[in-house]
Amino acid sequence: DDRYPMLLAARQTAKLDTRRILKRLAKENLKQLGRMVAKLAHANPMTVLRTIVHQIEAYRHMITPVVDAFKYLTQIVFDLEPYFFVLTA
């Protein structure tokens, strides 16, 4: 990974953007922010999913809004989910 600084920068940007969106995620703005999470997840699914899991582990009250926001994710992200959980286990 150290050989590809642009890849590292893209991962870090996706992580920070995901955290910024999750901080603002609530029932009132679910549609807008859910779509933003979906856009990020489509571009960098493993980083976004990893960040979401870490945030949910830290803040349990986020589970419901995040699950509701998942309805905006594309099918490709759902296809990658099993691989993500195998890699992180």
Image (cartoon, helix red, strand yellow):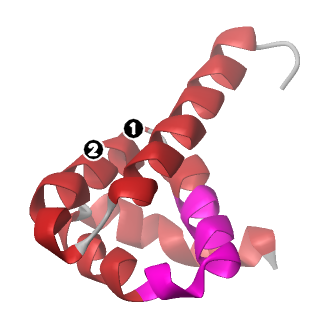
Give the magenta part as a residue range: 49-63
Residue 70 position, x and y percent, is 29, 73
Cβ atoms under marks 1 and 2 closer than 8 Å: yes
Q: Quadrant of residue 2?
A: top right
Residue type for callout 1: Ala
Residue 12 position, x and y percent, is 64, 30
Q: Which residue is mark 1?
A: 43
In the structure shown, which secondary structural element does the residue marked by tag 1 occupy? helix
Q: Is residue 76 above or below residue 40?
A: below
- The C terminus, quarter of image: bottom right
Q: Which residue is mark 2?
A: 39
Residue 72 position, x and y percent, is 19, 65
Say which mark, if any, is on residue 83.
none
Residue shown at 62%/32% (left/top)?
A: 11
Q: Is residue 1 above or below residue 56?
A: above
Residue 83 position, x and y percent, is 62, 70
Query: Viewer-nearest of labels 1 and 2?
Result: 2
Q: Is residue 75 visible?
A: yes
Q: Which secondary structure dominates the residues rendered in magenta? A: helix
Numbered marks: total: 2
